Amino acid sequence: MLPVDVDTLIKEAEEAKKHAIAPYSGFTVGAALVTDGGRIYRGCNIENPSLMLSFCAERSALIKALTEGERDFKAMGIVSGDGRYCFPCGGCRQMLAEFAPDIEIYLVSDKGIKKYSVQELLPYTFKR
Protein backbone atom coordinates (compact mmCIF):
# COMPACT_ATOMS: atom_id res chain seq x y z
CA MET A 1 0.00 0.00 0.00
CA LEU A 2 1.23 3.48 -0.88
CA PRO A 3 1.86 5.96 1.95
CA VAL A 4 0.03 8.60 -0.18
CA ASP A 5 -2.72 8.13 -2.74
CA VAL A 6 -1.87 8.11 -6.44
CA ASP A 7 -3.77 11.37 -7.03
CA THR A 8 -1.55 13.16 -4.51
CA LEU A 9 1.56 11.71 -6.14
CA ILE A 10 0.40 12.90 -9.56
CA LYS A 11 -0.44 16.39 -8.23
CA GLU A 12 3.10 16.62 -6.82
CA ALA A 13 4.53 15.62 -10.21
CA GLU A 14 2.38 18.29 -11.88
CA GLU A 15 3.77 20.88 -9.44
CA ALA A 16 7.31 19.74 -10.19
CA LYS A 17 6.68 20.09 -13.94
CA LYS A 18 6.02 23.81 -13.44
CA HIS A 19 9.72 24.27 -12.67
CA ALA A 20 10.99 22.45 -15.78
CA ILE A 21 13.48 24.29 -17.97
CA ALA A 22 13.04 23.06 -21.54
CA PRO A 23 13.90 25.91 -23.94
CA TYR A 24 15.19 23.60 -26.68
CA SER A 25 12.61 20.82 -26.87
CA GLY A 26 9.67 22.55 -25.22
CA PHE A 27 8.97 19.15 -23.63
CA THR A 28 8.44 19.60 -19.89
CA VAL A 29 8.40 16.70 -17.44
CA GLY A 30 7.69 16.47 -13.73
CA ALA A 31 8.26 13.55 -11.39
CA ALA A 32 7.39 12.89 -7.78
CA LEU A 33 8.99 10.11 -5.77
CA VAL A 34 7.47 8.91 -2.50
CA THR A 35 9.44 7.05 0.14
CA ASP A 36 8.18 4.23 2.35
CA GLY A 37 7.87 6.84 5.11
CA GLY A 38 5.61 9.06 2.98
CA ARG A 39 8.10 11.81 2.17
CA ILE A 40 7.78 13.16 -1.38
CA TYR A 41 10.67 14.38 -3.52
CA ARG A 42 9.95 16.31 -6.71
CA GLY A 43 12.05 16.59 -9.83
CA CYS A 44 11.80 18.26 -13.22
CA ASN A 45 13.76 18.14 -16.45
CA ILE A 46 16.42 20.77 -17.04
CA GLU A 47 17.84 21.17 -20.53
CA ASN A 48 21.25 22.43 -21.54
CA PRO A 49 22.56 23.26 -25.03
CA SER A 50 24.98 20.38 -24.52
CA LEU A 51 22.43 17.57 -24.38
CA MET A 52 24.76 15.39 -22.32
CA LEU A 53 24.44 17.93 -19.50
CA SER A 54 20.64 17.92 -19.49
CA PHE A 55 18.88 16.32 -16.55
CA CYS A 56 15.73 14.22 -16.46
CA ALA A 57 12.88 14.71 -14.00
CA GLU A 58 13.07 11.14 -12.73
CA ARG A 59 16.76 11.33 -11.93
CA SER A 60 16.29 14.78 -10.42
CA ALA A 61 13.76 13.45 -7.89
CA LEU A 62 15.80 10.32 -7.20
CA ILE A 63 19.06 12.22 -6.65
CA LYS A 64 17.31 14.66 -4.28
CA ALA A 65 16.05 11.75 -2.20
CA LEU A 66 19.34 9.86 -2.23
CA THR A 67 21.33 12.93 -1.18
CA GLU A 68 18.96 13.35 1.78
CA GLY A 69 19.76 9.81 2.91
CA GLU A 70 16.60 8.12 1.65
CA ARG A 71 16.97 4.54 0.46
CA ASP A 72 13.47 3.02 0.64
CA PHE A 73 11.15 4.07 -2.16
CA LYS A 74 7.53 3.20 -2.79
CA ALA A 75 6.35 4.89 -6.00
CA MET A 76 7.03 7.53 -8.64
CA GLY A 77 4.54 9.54 -10.67
CA ILE A 78 5.62 11.00 -14.03
CA VAL A 79 3.77 13.62 -16.08
CA SER A 80 4.64 15.43 -19.30
CA GLY A 81 3.62 18.80 -20.62
CA ASP A 82 2.08 17.45 -23.81
CA GLY A 83 -0.51 15.11 -22.29
CA ARG A 84 1.15 11.89 -23.51
CA TYR A 85 2.67 9.09 -21.47
CA CYS A 86 6.29 9.91 -20.69
CA PHE A 87 8.35 6.77 -20.17
CA PRO A 88 11.68 7.16 -18.37
CA CYS A 89 14.75 7.16 -20.61
CA GLY A 90 17.24 4.31 -20.45
CA GLY A 91 19.53 6.13 -18.04
CA CYS A 92 16.66 6.83 -15.64
CA ARG A 93 15.48 3.23 -15.89
CA GLN A 94 18.95 1.99 -14.96
CA MET A 95 19.19 4.39 -12.00
CA LEU A 96 15.75 3.32 -10.77
CA ALA A 97 16.70 -0.34 -11.19
CA GLU A 98 19.79 0.18 -9.05
CA PHE A 99 18.42 2.45 -6.31
CA ALA A 100 14.66 1.78 -6.31
CA PRO A 101 14.11 -1.65 -7.90
CA ASP A 102 10.78 -2.35 -6.21
CA ILE A 103 8.93 0.95 -6.70
CA GLU A 104 5.73 1.36 -8.67
CA ILE A 105 5.91 3.76 -11.64
CA TYR A 106 2.73 5.68 -12.51
CA LEU A 107 2.66 7.31 -15.95
CA VAL A 108 -0.04 9.88 -16.68
CA SER A 109 -1.59 10.97 -19.97
CA ASP A 110 -4.82 12.49 -21.17
CA LYS A 111 -6.03 8.89 -21.49
CA GLY A 112 -5.45 7.95 -17.86
CA ILE A 113 -2.85 6.42 -15.57
CA LYS A 114 -0.72 3.34 -16.29
CA LYS A 115 1.24 1.49 -13.62
CA TYR A 116 4.52 -0.32 -14.27
CA SER A 117 7.24 -2.01 -12.28
CA VAL A 118 10.89 -1.18 -12.88
CA GLN A 119 11.36 -4.75 -14.11
CA GLU A 120 8.68 -4.21 -16.78
CA LEU A 121 10.39 -1.04 -17.98
CA LEU A 122 13.91 -2.54 -17.88
CA PRO A 123 13.73 -6.35 -17.93
CA TYR A 124 17.46 -6.95 -18.44
CA THR A 125 19.19 -4.59 -16.04
CA PHE A 126 22.92 -4.18 -15.93
CA LYS A 127 24.34 -5.75 -12.80
CA ARG A 128 27.96 -5.91 -11.80
Image: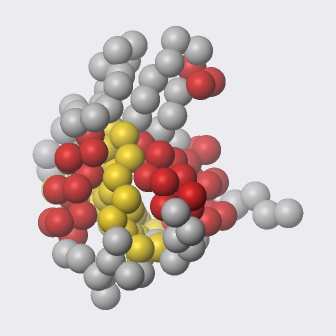
Residue 83: quarter of image:
top left
Residue 115: quarter of image:
bottom left
Question: Is 54 above or below relative to 50?
Answer: below
Split into 4 quadrants, where in the image is the N terminus? bottom left
Task: Tell me if residue 6 can be seen.
Answer: yes
Image mark count: 0
Direction from residue 60 to residue 113 in the image, left or right: left
Residue depicted at x 52% and y 12%: 49
Residue 14 appears at what percent x and percent y? 20, 47
Work out whether residue 86 or residue 58 is closer to the camera in this orientation and state it.
58
Task: Tell me if residue 121 can be seen.
Answer: no
Work out whether residue 24 or residue 60 is closer to the camera in this orientation and state it.
60
Colour scheme of the rendered structure: secondary structure
Identity of the residue furthest to the bottom in this view: 1
Residue depicted at x 47% and y 46%: 60
Residue depicted at x 52% and y 63%: 68
Residue 57: quarter of image:
top left
Split into 4 quadrants, where in the image is the C terminus? bottom right
Direction from residue 9 to residue 23 in the image, left or right: right
Direction from residue 121 to residue 113 in the image, left or right: left
Residue depicted at x 48% and y 54%: 64
Identity of the residue furthest to the right in this view: 128
Residue 100 appears at what percent x and percent y? 55, 68
Residue 46 appears at what percent x and percent y? 43, 29
Direction from residue 93 to residue 85 in the image, left or right: left
Residue 24 appears at what percent x and percent y? 39, 13
